Image (cartoon, rainbow, N blue to C red):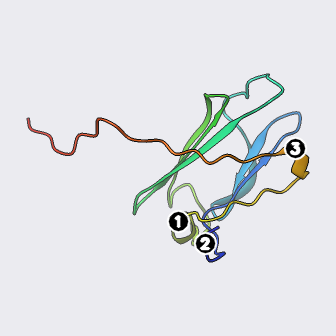
Amino acid sequence: YTAQGSHAGLLYIRFSSTVQYQLGFCRPSWTDFPTSFPSATEKVLRITVTRTPVVSKLQIHCNEVEVLNVLMSSSRCNNKSWREIWSNKVGKIKFWGTASDYSYRPYRATCTGLKTSWTN
């Protein structure tokens, strides 16, 4: 959600015999993850959204193993509001489920060595 309470994307993850995800405001169907989750009992997820004016990229890592890397675009998303909603800045995160099963720790990466100009 944004700080004001509007949607800033929507991701559902269902842990059952097959771990599945659903991208709200993009595709309404449950989809199997393309990569299996690590077998460890404790699963630490890192969810990263990279936004541009044209596409949003969603990556999910579980215990440092990439389990999803998807580009959201008009050709993938069948909801006409996807671009507006997924481009909002995240200000709040909400979890559904048993509170004792989840904890949240924000993660910020620092970009180093960024090259801002190139010459041929």
Residue 91 percent coordinates (x, y): 60, 65
Residues under numbered marks 2 and 1 in contact, where contact means CB atoms less than 8 Å apart: yes
Left or right of 62? Residue 54 is left
Distance in Å between CA atoms under marks 2 and 1: 8 Å
Instruction: Decide: few, some or many residues near mark 1? Use Cα within 10 Å; few <14, some 14-19, many ≥20.
Output: some
**Which residue was labeled with disc 1?**
89
**Residue 112 or 19: which is nearer the viewer?**
112
Residue 60 percent coordinates (x, y): 62, 40
Left or right of 84? Residue 63 is right
**Element assignment for label 3:** helix
Residue at 9% across, 38% down: 119
Q: Amino acid at mark 2?
A: Ala
Q: Amino acid at mark 1?
A: Lys
Nearest to the eye among marks 2 and 1: give it: 2
**Residue 61 or 32: which is nearer the viewer?**
61
**Element assignment for label 1:** loop
